[in-house]
Amino acid sequence: MNVVSVASVSKSLGERVLFSQLSFGLNQGQKLGLLGRNGCGKTTLLRMIAGLDRPDDGEIRINKQIRTAYLEQDPLLGATGPVMDAILHNDRPQSRWLREYYDLSDRDHLSDDEVERMNRLHQVMEEQGLWTYQRDFNRLLGELEIPDLRQDMSTLSGGQRKRVALAAMMVAEADLILLDEPTNHLDLNTIEWLENRLRNQKTTLLLVTHDRYFLESVCNGMLELEQGKLYFHQGDYATFLENKETREQIQTADAQKTRAWLRKELEWMRRQPKARGTKSKARTEQFYKVSNEASKREVQGRLELDGVGRPLGGKVLEISYLTKSFGDRNLVKEFTYNFVKGDRVGVVGRNGLGKTTFLNLLTGHLRPDGGSVEWGEQTVVGYYRQESLVYKPGQTVLERVREVTDHIRLSSGKEVSAGDYLQRFLFPPKQQHDKVDKLSGGEKRRLQLLLVLIAQPNFLIMDEPTNDLDLVSLQVLEDYLEKFKGCLLLVSHDRYFMDRLVDHMFVFEGEGFIRDFPGNYTDYRLSQSEGRLSQSEGRLGTATSVTASADTSANQANKPAQTTTKNKQRGTKPTYAQTRRYEELTQRLAVIRAEKTDLIDKLNRSGAAPDEYASWGKALQALESEEEKVEWEWLELSVALEP
């Protein structure tokens, strides 16, 4: 069944043509990634399909039998009122009944009319089977850690707003889901939760994201928007890369032929007299047409990151017993670490545990409650912050760069002007004189990155640098950082980015405790899955143990069992410790399953407060995670203990 039909759609922003005569369709069950450079019109296209913007020409038709949900990059900005209203704002009867139920349940005293309404609601919910819907809703709140439905939206952070918007999207149970950078502002655990959820849902999906693991896991096709044209690629992200490389090779060969043809045609045009016949006129028009298309291809360009990194001294950065709290919340507790040359550290942890606070303490944007931060004399810090680019009203792109410097020294030793350097960052001369506030979100991020690098830092601190960058720019940034000779401290929710660039990680576990883990993000998740993190291993301060993850893949899970089988074939007898551990796991499984049954019973009840449901849902999710880990270890030991 056709869900969306886009026919001959064109869109311009002022003099800038985003795309012209685009046509494509979305069929039921397709899950497509929408890819393209910053500013090419991806968000505009999503907004038009969602009905929030109109094309200049053409038509977009949505199947009338389906429901559509759209998640913006920064959802619910400026929203006020209770969280419950933001989540249950859709017009589905289930949501209306649930909203009324929670509204009445939240009151201390009910009038006779309200008691009658509550009784009628109970009857309707019983008849319509809505207690299951309520249970699923409460579980969703727990999984997304939304504890208080009464909290006002104006008090929420960007990450919390994103979670509320995700809950609203899930509750709407839409047939078509449109997502614009859904992983921005989310922590890694929530990203993996969303990834699993979308992968297993039978919905039609069109999403814009720079998260390559997300694309690879969720999507079964790619739409690439390039130079106003749309290319469809069947298959996952890896297949898309192969197809794109093949197409670009063909285009390169075509471009060479075109340039040779243009040279010949130009010579012919110069030889012609002013009075031309019909054939000459047609040939001239063809020349200008091909010349225009060729110039469009060459304007595309590629982001070039270059600059001289200053040498580091013997002392880089020494952190001693660093401590910071806000009220009763400990965010950093007695953290000690000495950076050395070449350190490449990732920072991970759930939202709200203090990652950005930690960076602000190191850079002097916050004062610690205790401890010290001492930078080496030769250490030059470049801090790429999550916050939006700072600029003056009416300021142009070139004016903003010249506030910092007029000339930049490249790694070759050559000096270039601010304007030339901007061209390397894909800001052509005409755009350099545009107002900064006219740039797209990705273009502003690119400019922000430029402003950090022109200071020639040898210690880069980057807080979510991948937000709003397109995949091409992201790959170039990765290449640059991989060759960067200074120190790197990186906070990112992009798992591929983290895997490629860091050697070890600071893991924020809560209550101010930070663990130094030796390895990249995938190593860390594997260690969680296999339960190899002890309470004291690699700890800085007095951290608590890390809870095992529930996202063990089949290959990872089978690996220990295969090893055990090999040992068995060699005739290795089970040890006393193995037998004792098997008994402990058997008892623990029984306890877990009993606790799960109790929590499910609680979730199926009515009349509890919303924060209780959220707490039960979160506890159930943790138990299911533990159950999966314990079951794998129990199965492994059961094979080893077979006679």
Image (cartoon, rainbow, N blue to C red):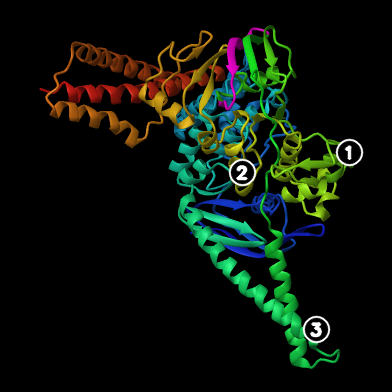
Q: Amino acid at mark 2?
A: Leu
Q: Position of residue 42 (x, y in %)?
A: 65, 52
Q: Quadrant of residue 316?
A: top right
**Disc 2 residue crowd, few under 14, some 14–19, many 20+, Cα 10 Å:** many
Residues at circles 1 and 2 in contact by the CB criterion of under 8 Å = no
Residue corresponding to mark 1: 393
The main secondary structure of the magenta stretch is: strand
Where are the magenta residues, as a range?
327-346
Horizontal and vertical percent position of residue 124: 50, 31
Q: Earlier in the sequence, mark 3 or mark 1?
A: 3
The secondary element bearing badge 2 is classed as helix
Amino acid type shown at disc 3? Arg
Residue 270, numbered circle: 3
- Relative to 458, say whether 49 is above or below: below
Give the labeled residue for mark 2: 474
Label 3, residues with CA under 10 Å away: few <14, some 14-19, many ≥20: few
